[in-house]
Image: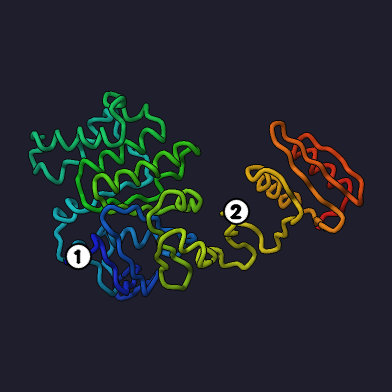
């Protein structure tokens, strides 16, 4: 018999109660998180992602519907029990004085140590395992206030792992990181999900990295039910366009980029496959109307060279920038 999903939401209504007044943020929210999977939740600002996260954390009760952890209704968990099942990493910068990184990771054991806070052998083993899994061994003795944003995020993930909840929730963990650290954090989380058999939910606005790293996407469009699925399935089904409701943008399946609906890439471009997409991207940004009846482009690599034929006249360009300038001088913008 298949084990139930680690976290199940069914027909949830999310929002706030103030006295007798109810402010509903989202309704009809249904989803599942499976152990061993990294799931990314995406949606526009104000759609209810943070409210959903706070509801899963037990901070806000559901207005309606069911929310179950390992088959048990979330309202039936005490706060202590919930903290042993859920680990959370938020975006707020911690004020921890001179606390060292290892000490911060150790705080993840609080739900398990009781009021005395003494660390036993099992606690120390969990801390060391979390530090090893996040590759933060070299940061053990660093004061937390000296850590970079990327280093601190890894240490916070280590703290959540030390807590040893089956479900790990992260609210925009890559928001303030550079490109390399954003990818590193997300690939680390995918690795942790698989090796430690955790159900990991990441709230993010970074669609490109989510497509690269997630096992499953949860799309939360405005006024529509959550869309759940394998990332590549959602791409070919055109579901990613539900995140772009203004009608001016769409997700371009061939390039994996968000582009204007008016985008009209040139057709008659030949050359090495790794170069052609970058030339097309530059041409689209330049907003040039390419008529392939009178303009043909042939590309060469190592070194780069573009041969352009305009009305039968052949020209050579040594860079993409030079190609764009030549075309701008020869044809009109859209």
Please, is residue 152 above or below residue 285 in the view?
Answer: above
Q: Residue at x 42, y 49 (%)?
A: 213
Is tag 1's residue or tag 2's residue first in the polypeptide sequence? 1
Mark number, residue 21: none
Marks 1 and 2 close (CB-CB < 8 Å): no
| Kind of element beneath mark 1 | loop
Question: Would you say 302 lies left or right of 42 here?
Answer: right
Q: Residue at x 34, y 54 (%)?
A: 201
- Tell how many labels: 2
Relative depth, front residue between 287 and 65: 287
Mark number, residue 2: 1
Question: Would you say 89 lies left or right of 6 here?
Answer: right
Please, is residue 227 above or below residue 90 in the view?
Answer: below
Q: CA distance from mark 1 to mark 2?
A: 38 Å
The image's colouring method is: rainbow
Residue 44, position as x, y percentages in the image: 49, 61
Relative depth, front residue between 147 and 328: 328
- Give the crowd class for mark 2: few <14, some 14-19, many >=20 residues within 10 Å: few
Can I make out residue 75 in this image? no
Question: Would you say 6 lies left or right of 289 here?
Answer: left
Residue 76, position as x, y percentages in the image: 15, 65
Residue 161, position as x, y percentages in the image: 24, 43
Please, is residue 241 above or below residue 169 in the view?
Answer: below
Quarter occupied by the N terminus: bottom left
Question: Would you say 266 lies left or right of 21 here?
Answer: right
Residue 299, position as x, y percentages in the image: 74, 42
Q: Which residue is label 2 attached to?
A: 255
Can I make out residue 44 in this image? yes
Q: Residue at x 26, y 33 (%)?
A: 132
Quarter occupied by the C terminus: bottom right
């Amino acid at each position: 018999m298949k084990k139930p999903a680690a976290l199940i939401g069914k027909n949830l209504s999310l929002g706030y109660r103030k006295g007798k007044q109810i402010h509903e943020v989202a309704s009809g929210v249904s989803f599942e998180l499976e152990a061993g999977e990294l799931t990314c939740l995406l949606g526009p600002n104000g759609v209810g992602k943070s409210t959903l996260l706070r509801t899963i954390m037990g901070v806000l009760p559901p207005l309606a519907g069911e929310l179950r952890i390992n088959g048990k209704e979330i309202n039936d968990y005490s706060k202590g029990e919930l903290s042993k099942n859920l680990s959370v990493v938020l975006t707020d910068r911690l004020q921890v004085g001179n606390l060292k990184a290892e000490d911060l990771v150790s705080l993840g054991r609080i739900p398990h140590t009781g009021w005395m806070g003494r660390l036993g052998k099992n606690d120390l083993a969990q801390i060391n395992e979390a530090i090893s899994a996040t590759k933060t061994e070299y940061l053990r003795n660093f004061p937390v206030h000296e850590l970079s944003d990327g280093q601190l995020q890894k240490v916070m993930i280590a703290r959540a792992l030390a807590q040893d909840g089956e479900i790990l929730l992260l609210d925009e963990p890559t928001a303030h990181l550079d490109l390399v650290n954003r990818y590193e954090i997300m690939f680390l989380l995918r690795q942790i999900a698989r090796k430690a058999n955790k159900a990991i939910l990441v709230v993010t606005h970074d669609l490109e990295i989510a497509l690269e790293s997630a096992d499953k996407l949860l799309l939360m469009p405005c006024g529509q039910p959550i869309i759940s699925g394998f990332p590549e399935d959602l791409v070919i089904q055109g579901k990613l366009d539900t995140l772009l409701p203004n009608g001016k943008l769409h997700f371009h399946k061939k390039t994996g980029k968000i582009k204007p609906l008016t985008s009209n890439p040139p057709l008659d471009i030949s050359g090495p496959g790794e170069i052609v997409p970058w030339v097309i991207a530059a041409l689209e940004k330049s907003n040039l109307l390419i008529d392939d009846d009178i303009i043909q482009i042939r590309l060469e690599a190592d070194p780069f060279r573009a041969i352009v034929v305009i009305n039968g006249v052949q020209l050579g360009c040594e860079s993409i920038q030079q190609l764009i300038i030549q075309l701008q001088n020869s044809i009109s913008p859209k």
